[in-house]
Image (tube, helix red, strand yellow):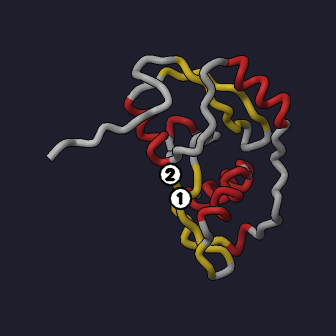
Amino acid sequence: MTKETKKYPFNEGDDYWTIESCNYGQDLEVVHSFWDDISEQIHDENPDRLLFATEQEAIDYLSKKKPTLKRPKEYDVKLFTCVDFGDVCHWDYPDYCDAFIEEAEYDGRELSEEELDEVNEDSALVHELLMNYLY
């Protein structure tokens, strides 16, 4: 039996950049990293996460995309239940920039993958739900 080798966008030790939300979800910043086994784990958990080969690519994406932190759909935080999080790194307290929602129910109904993607785009909402969960 052969072991399947996974394909990743970068190789061990490669530089890469991401766009992260910080300051309790109010700001976005370009973050530099080196590809390693932790990067592979993060990629396995969230393969659609935007990764950039250069810092300039990430900056250009931010300037063209002009991402908004406003909620595309207005969610009532009190209606979320059974929320499970991924990438909760306590060394990143209080920002928890990598945290995302893996599963959740909203108003008694399990959210679809598309709805989870929409919720996870709203870093302020994710942060608020995480703070409610942790504290």
Q: Quadrant of residue 82?
A: bottom right
Is 9 in front, or is 91? 9
Side of 90 where 115 appears, left or right: right
Residue at point 75% right, 34% down? 28
Residue 103 in the image, given as x and y percentages of width and height: 54, 64
Estimate how packed mark 2 is, as few (under 14), some (14 to 19) or many (20 or more) residues with alpha carbons within 10 Å: some
Amino acid at the residue labelled 2: Gly
Q: In the rendered image, which residue does mark 2 sit on?
A: 86
Q: Secondary structure at mark 1?
A: strand
Q: Secondary structure at mark 2?
A: strand
Amino acid at the residue labelled 1: Glu
Is 25 in front, or is 53? 53
Q: Which mark is residue 129?
A: none
Residue at point 59% right, 75% down? 110
Residue 76 in the image, given as x and y percentages of width and height: 77, 70
Estimate how packed mark 1 is, as few (under 14), some (14 to 19) or many (20 or more) residues with alpha carbons within 10 Å: some
In the image, residue 54 above or below residue 84: above
Disc 2/disc 1 C-alpha distance (Å)? 6 Å
Residue 131 in the image, given as x and y percentages of width and height: 63, 55
User: Residue pushed farthest bottom?
Assistant: 108
Labels 2 and 1 touching (C-beta < 8 A): yes
Q: In the rendered image, which residue does mark 1 sit on?
A: 102
Q: Quadrant of residue 8?
A: top left
Side of 95 where 34 appears, left or right: left
Mark 2 or mark 1, earlier in chain: 2
Which image quarter holds the C terminus?
bottom right
Residue at point 54% right, 23% down? 33
